[in-house]
Amino acid sequence: MKKIYDCVVIGAGVAGMTAAIYLKRANIDFILLEKGVPGGQINKSSNIENYPGFKKVDGPTLAFNIYEQIEKLGVDYKYGDVKEVRDSENYKVVCTDKEEFVTKTVIIATGRRPRELGLANEKKLLGSGISYCAYCDGMLYKNKDVIIIGGGNSALEEALYIADIANKVYIVHRSSEYRADQFLIDKVNKKENIIKYFNKEVIDILEQDDRFSGVKLNDESVINADGLFIYIGQIPETNFIDNIKTTEDGYIITDSHLKTSDDKIYACGDVLKKDLYQIATSIGEGALAASNIIKILK
């Protein structure tokens, strides 16, 4: 007979790992599934300054610290790219690309992925001059010129990071002002090698010898550069969900207890429709989702 878990947690970002800590301490029989690296999107953050207890920490360090904690607790952790969550009598079946897990309850903590520009050769040049993570790939552009597209906190944080590595950093933003914290804007304005373009959009990605070589803007001007980093927003990772309520753009809708439209499925972290997407909120939601799962199980 196939093993029946009390819970399956899908996603090992900060929300999912926090839920795992609470479930393990309550002696719940569960498994944590992740298709990528533990920590999720925070692994792409070069500098975190708004998380209590840390004056300054980089994303991978924080992610590894949380992962070490769940490892020491003995959390059952497994690779799995979830393709479907379906009903089977009184249980849920979580189907990955490799196997299936039968469970009484599910916590979805799959977070978000970077939004693409949607231009013709964007996917082709990914890894050949195009990236969604300056912290991951910034050192490849030492003393070179790069372009960052976006105007939010992530775009400006990574522009500041790579400005200490690259020769010039061009920030292209489609609006007349940034949508970022003022202290980041002030830092960007003080950097002499950051060149700012407002009210501009990229309409074409240029290439030479199968590598990124620059962009064409909506005013027909061209910026030549060696690298392109894209920070134009995030998309929730909910492509495997078809049996619970979501918004039109795919975010999961929950009640105040983080229960979805299905009584046996809860959700937490950046996959939720909410007002604030921060590490602190995701951790709180992971704790709350797990605590409510514990209540219904016991």
Image (cartoon, grey):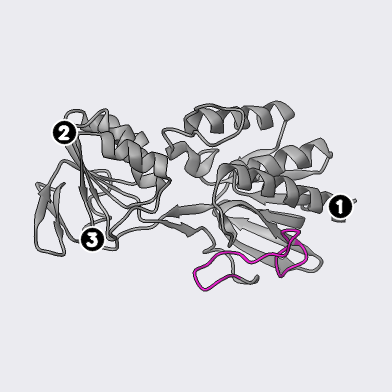
Would you identify the image quadrant in which residue 189 lies?
Answer: top left
Disc 3 element: loop
Distance from Cα at disc 1 to Cα at disc 2 = 55 Å
Q: Residues within 10 Å of mark 1 (few under 14, many from 20)?
A: few
Q: Position of residue 15 (x, y in %)?
A: 63, 45
User: Does residue 133 appear in this view?
Assistant: no
Residue at x-position 86% and y-position 56%: 296
Q: Position of residue 124 (x, y in %)?
A: 24, 54
Disc 1 element: helix
| Prevailing SS of the magenta stretch | loop
167 vs 64, left or right, is left
Q: Residues within 10 Å of mark 3 (few under 14, many from 20)?
A: few
Relative to 119, is 139 above or below?
Answer: above
Q: Is residue 178 magenta?
A: no
Q: Which residue is mark 3?
A: 199
119 vs 45, left or right, is left
Along the polypeptide, which appears first: circle 2 or circle 3?
2
Q: Position of residue 99 (x, y in %)?
A: 62, 52
Q: Viewer-proximal residue, 178 or 103?
A: 178
Is the residue under label 2 in contact with that under label 1 (CB below 8 Å)? no
Query: At label 1, which amino acid type do we have?
Result: Lys
143 vs 103, left or right, is left
Query: At label 2, which amino acid type do we have?
Result: Lys
Q: Nearer the viewer, mark 3 or mark 1?
A: 3
Q: Which residues are magenta?
A: 246-264
Q: Which mark is residue 295?
A: 1
Q: Which residue is mark 2?
A: 144
